Amino acid sequence: MIQTILLRLPNWLGDSVMCTSAFQKLKRMYPHAQFVLVGSYVCEIFRRDPCVKAIYLDESKKAKNRILNLYNLAKTIRTEIGPIDLGFCFSNGFFGALLLYLCKAKVRVGYAKNLRSFLLTHALKPPTLKPLHQVQKYEYLIKDFVDYAIFEAYTPLHLVCGKESKIICGDKKHIGINPGAAFGWAKCWEKEYFIDIITRFAARGWEVYIFGDTQNLTIQDDTHIHDFSNKTTLIELIDSIKALDLFITNDSGPMHIAAALQTPTIAIFGSTDTADTCPWNLPIAQEFFLPSQAMIPHALDSTPYPTPKDITTYTTLTADTITILSKHLECAPCKKRTCPLKHHLCMKSITPDEVFAIALTMLQLPKE
């Protein structure tokens, strides 16, 4: 009987949120198991999940002797938790697999990357089928450890909400703005464009909340503009995004949080690939991704789905609560931290007028 499952989560916020679909499937398969999570500070987003027994921060990267630090962390986990029945490494680094090995997990699952296969009992080749969303790549790791019906079924991203929002609800519209992204400025819409739409929302008397990194936005003082950049915990960020009427964001961790909470979202893409990391919801999954999941090799056959549509042919895509904007220029997605061509046209070509018009539509208000 599986009693304890360890998940070594990715270090990035968005990736950890995208793991929640696989996490949900494991909870469904093993309803009596306790889960132990290891990762960076972003593990905090799971603090309120009742299935999580313990969370451990892996700060070995900061240590002078990383292996010794990791050994001591694994020793602490073994002492406090006991035997680990299943271990999944959702991070692709060598040291994530080493942690599972040092924790003496009976079964250790991860992708065969970065010279770490000898540390894993199940070193899987990364799936090459396309289209395949990052959510599905994380789900693929658990395919041999859950029933096929559970593996194949669409499962939404999931985060537990509470009452730690910094937003005071009222009759006015509450608009969230996330102008930054951890990977680099190439992923970010132009800061002048953000200032433009923030000013337009505030002029209507709506409450505008800025989260994450402000990109050094210079905005005139306004009682309707609330700067929460770098002023919220991850828990407060989750609850605040849940309270919004609309969230406008780059491809980022907060974007995936909004998708998990089903908060109406405008997601702006440039240097990154909508076919990899667009917001995940049922209409998008069904139309663009689920067919590829059904065709992943498995012990059982399944009825084939129709050929999926190509999401990269849509410059504007609205699916339920999500609108995705991407011009899909020839140079994109470059997936670089900075624009290698130095023109940043992938973002500059998405105008404030376009975003504002979509915002009014999503808020069910007449266009100007």
Image (spheres, rainbow, N blue to C red):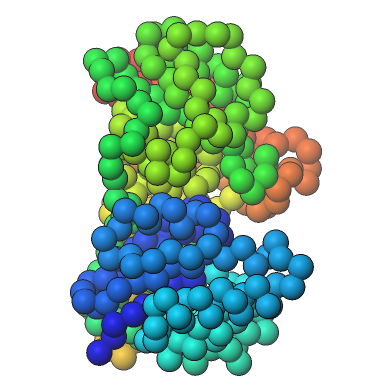
Q: Position of residue 65 (x, y in %)?
A: 74, 73
Above or below, 108 against 313 in this view is below
* Residue 161 as seen in the image, left or right of residue 139: left
Residue positioned 43% across, 12% down in the render: 224
Identify which residue, 75 or 246, lies in the foreground. 75
Residue 160 vertical placement versus 239 (above, below): below
In this view, 316 is above or below 120? above
Is residue 322 shown left or right of residue 41? Answer: left
x and y percent of residue 242 in the render?
32, 37
**Can residue 335 be seen at all in this image of the molecule?**
yes
Q: How far from the left and from the top, in percent, is residue 263?
A: 32, 38
Residue 356 in view here = no
Say which quadrant the C terminus sits in: top left
- The answer to which quarter of the image holds residue 167 is top left
Question: Which residue: 61% across, 46% down?
Answer: 182
- Residue 300 found in image quarter: bottom left
Q: Residue at x 58, y 89 (%)?
A: 119
Q: Quadrant of the N terminus?
A: bottom left
Looking at the image, which is closer to me, 215 or 43? Answer: 43
User: Is 354 displayed left or right of 320 in the figure?
Assistant: right
- Is residue 161 or residue 172 the one in the foreground? 161
Q: Position of residue 43 (x, y in %)?
A: 46, 57
In this figure, what is the number of numbered marks?
0
Front one among 316 and 364: 364
